[in-house]
Image (cartoon, helix red, strand yellow):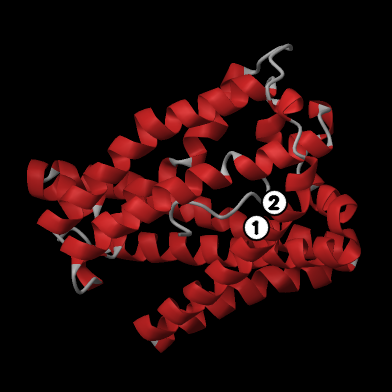
Amino acid sequence: FFWVSGGIYGSEDLLSAGPPLVIFGFVLTVALTFALPNALMTAELATFLPADGGQVAWVYEALGSVGHHNALWVWLCNLLDAAVYPQLAASYGSHALRLDPSQSQAIAYCFVGGVCLLNLCGLAAVTASQTFCFALALTPCLAFTAAGLPRLDLSAVAASEGDVSWELLLSWAVWLYSGFSSLGSMAGEVRTPQLTYPLAVALLLPLVTLLNVVPFAVALSVDPVREHFTAGYFGELADSLGGRPLRAFFSAGAIVSLLGLYHSQILAAERTSLAVP
């Protein structure tokens, strides 16, 4: 799950990129034209050549030494992406708990140390921790959506007037679906890839697409003013929908989601570095 999504946390800027109808149309178009082919390609190659490193191993198998160049850039992208999440978690924790800078940095150190310890404990511990993070990160998104569905306003969702920031919209929409190529990172450790990968793609793509549409529609129904949507604003909407309990639950889900995202990127970077001789 965390290779392809982390929930709706931190995606507020997407909703400020243009009118709702344009945003939803573009997000669905990217799902069909970018995410679906990428997911199907990954599922096919992971069943044909189930090797750790996924796309890195496949490029090396097809193109030989060119795979080293590809491996370097994939590894660097994973590493740079991973570095963001501990600091984001520190920022969320500092805002929610009103921590001073030294205390907030302790959250980042705990992220790094905790993930390192889990990896040392083996694959079973990694699987259990990611399953826990998945449940705790997804549940607040579902609670947020359920609380706001009675206030769903189709006229607000279908609004089409206003300027569009195409560069912001394109970057966000592609990023939302960019993780499907990473699904093969641990293909060599999957017992039955011929069954697991097609099933995973069949479940994850609809789930991620729904997460990128329905909660956003709820958010815009509650507050249609796009200028309000900056980082952290979903937490304020959660407060207006369910009070402090839902906001606290949502904040906890955000931090756990960042932990899952960080761990998934570290796993991908590890496998990438070992995928080519």
Choose between 263 and 241: the one closer to the eye.
Answer: 241
Which quadrant would residue 53 be assigned to in this image? bottom left
Q: Where is residue 8 in the image (x, y as percent from the top left)?
A: 63, 49
Residue 170 in sight here: no
Q: Which residue is drawn at 48% across and 82% down?
A: 118
Q: Which residue is drawn at 45% across and 41% down?
A: 177
Quarter occupied by the N terminus:
bottom left
Which quadrant would residue 3 be assigned to in this image? bottom left
Tag on residue 145? 2
Mark 1, secondary structure of its residue: helix
Mark 1 packing: few (<14 Cα in 10 Å), some, or many (20+)? some
Q: Position of residue 158 (x, y in %)?
A: 68, 22
Left or right: where 229 falls relative to 14? right
Q: Is 16 rendered above or below residue 215?
A: above
Residue that carries the numbered disc 1 in the rendered image: 142
Tag on residue 166? none
Mark 2 packing: few (<14 Cα in 10 Å), some, or many (20+)? many
Residue that lies at the very extreme toward the front in this rendered image? 150
Choose between 75 and 161: the one closer to the eye.
Answer: 161
Q: Residue at x 24, y 71 (%)?
A: 190
2 and 1 marks in contact (CB < 8 Å) = yes
The type of residue carrying mark 2 is Thr
